[in-house]
Amino acid sequence: MTTVTATATSLSWDEGAVVTIDQRALPHEIRELRLTDVDAVIAAIESLAVRGAPAIGLAGALGVALSARLHSGPDGVDRAAVHADAERLIAARPTAVNLEWAVRRTLTRLDEGAQAVLAEATAMLAEDATLNAAAVERAADLVDSLTPDRPLRLLTHCNTGRLATGAVGTALGTILHLAGRGRVREVLVDETRPLLQGARLTAWELGEAGVPYRLCVDSAAAGAMAHGLVDCVLVGADRIAANGDTANKIGTYGLAVAAARHGIPFVVVAPESTWDSSLADGSGIVIEERAAAEVTHLADRVCAPQDARAYNPAFDVTPAELITAIVTERRVFRPRRGVPQQLTAGVADDR
Ligand code: MRU
């Protein structure tokens, strides 16, 4: 068995500060951020210094703890002030349901005081490690059963590793787990335009763990599938409706269409907290629209005409019928019946 190491988690609490890695600076610099007020936590979530659905949930929970601490006095906690901060935290990004879920869960301890709120938030951090481990193990078993018995070529999108969670991650955690079992030949990493979470973050995490990977532009993914270079697609999720429709990073839907076309298993790995059972299907999921400059600029350099307008949704919704399985810490949900259990494509060539 190969040893694949996942290093320190990317979020913690340290004496009145939320401590995190500034994901905007990666992979050039490992810059630590110490967030000491709620505005700083909100700014970190909005700017994607902290990103990934579980991670922004945990940051939101720690933000509530920060608020409760800062609004504590001799007469106890100023509940109205903390609730106002909580609503601002929830509004920082609209698509990932984990943010609202985590903030509201932390608020349930507010009557017991700031220390109890902090205990809830830090318990959630610890829980994430257990949840990740359970989901990853189950997802790895599923991928094992769905794919040919040879070292696999996996494709992933965006970043779903330790940077995006409180522990080893979801889809990327599964890939690392499979690598630990000696099951991974290569990971194709979509660069994930426009903010390059794949190129900057997933590639960094895979390199750190010593797992072989190649980067590709997002638009190369369908062709890679056609050429037999992909045995399974693994992605995370930001919000999953009751029927399994799944919101995830923009481009995920196209990957699912291409995977279905080529009979390739398409597996979503996410914690149970990513389900939003209040929504019957994905049509009600609010998709965050981000600034045009993310599309019209490349690393602060203009790459489009000055007056170019942009369409920049941060996420899309993959219909449940295109998804082979959604794996959580508790279950394997199979929205698509009759999915091919084995690849229809032949053994991948060496390109
Ligand atoms: O905009 P981002 O980088 O926060 O988007 C993240 C994703 O789409 C991830 O795939 C998702 O949050 C799951 S992270 C385990």
Image (spheres, helix red, strand yellow):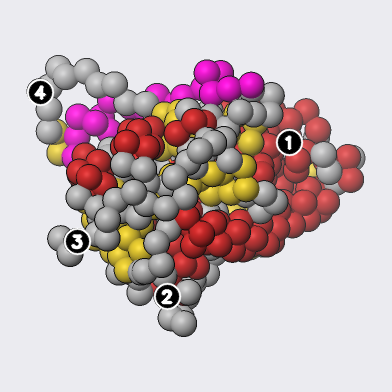
The residue located at (15%, 38%) in the rendering is 301
Q: Is residue 262 visible?
A: yes
Q: Position of residue 164 (x, y in %)?
A: 49, 52
Task: Give whichever of discs 2 and 3 has the lower sequence position.
Answer: 2
Report crowding for label 3: few under 14, some 14 to 19, many 20 or more residues within 10 A (C-alpha).
few
| Badge 4 or badge 1: first in the primary sequence | 1
Real-space CA distance between mark 3 and mark 1, rounded to the nearest whole angstrom: 50 Å
- Residue 349 is tagged as 3
- Residue 71 position by quadrant: top right
Determine which of the numbered discs, if any, sits on residue 182 in the image. 2
Q: Position of residue 336 (x, y in %)?
A: 52, 35
- Does residue 235 show up? no
Q: Are marks 3 and 4 in contact (CB under 8 Å)?
A: no
> Which is more toward the observer, 317 or 19?
317
Task: Give the residue number, with chain letter if any, for mark 1.
Answer: 104
The mark found on residue 112 in the picture is none
Quarter that holds the C terminus: bottom left
Location of mark 4 (residue) = 305
98 relative to 163 in the view: left or right = right
Which numbered disc, 3 or 4, marks the residue closer to the eye?
Answer: 3
Disc 3, disc 1: CB below 8 Å? Answer: no
